[in-house]
Image (cartoon, rainbow, N blue to C red):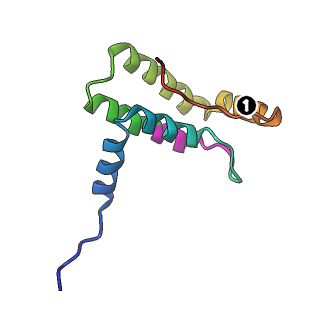
């Protein structure tokens, strides 16, 4: 019988980051963390998802200095406020019957 190895968290993360190089995959991934579920919005998890997308974009040489600056500003805000502004927007849109949908720019 062949020895099978279970995937490690490192190989799982590598797979995820590689898949996030695709802009549609990245948009869908971010969008998932902007949806409300029974646990609500979690800024820590959202920050982690953004970090993974940023890592993927950097690996594909698709991340400008301006994008890095905006990411750093957003990450700082999320760290300081817990994403209260984003949570407020998501909850408000939810009460109106909407949700955020990310689409790639032309």
Q: Is residue 52 left or right of residue 58?
A: right
- From the top left corner, tell me how far across and down residue 46 is, in percent: 53, 39
Q: Is residue 47 magenta?
A: yes
- From the top left corner, tell me how far across and down residue 38 is, in percent: 71, 53
Q: Is residue 76 left or right of residue 90?
A: left
Quarter residue 44 falls in? top right
- From the top left corner, tell me how far across and down residue 1 is, in percent: 17, 86
Q: Secondary structure at mark 1?
A: helix
Residue lying at the far right in this picture: please name it.
Answer: 96
- From the top left corner, tell me how far across and down residue 48 is, in percent: 46, 41
Q: Which residues are magenta?
A: 40-49
Q: Is residue 75 magenta?
A: no
Chief secondary structure of the magenta portion: helix
Label 1: few (<14), some (14–19) or many (≥20) C-alpha neighbours in 10 Å = few
Can you say whether 84 is above or below 13 in the image?
Answer: above
**Label 1 belongs to which residue?**
88
């Amino acid at each position: 019988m062949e020895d099978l190895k279970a995937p490690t968290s490192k190989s799982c993360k590598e797979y995820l980051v590689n898949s996030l190089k695709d802009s549609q995959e990245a948009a869908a991934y971010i969008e998932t963390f902007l949806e409300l579920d029974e646990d609500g919005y979690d800024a820590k998890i959202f920050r982690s998802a953004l970090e993974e997308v940023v890592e993927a974009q950097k690996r594909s040489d698709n991340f400008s200095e301006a994008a890095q600056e905006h990411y750093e500003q957003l990450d700082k805000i999320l760290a300081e406020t817990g994403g209260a502004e984003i949570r407020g927007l998501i909850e408000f849109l939810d009460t109106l019957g909407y949700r955020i949908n990310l689409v790639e720019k032309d």
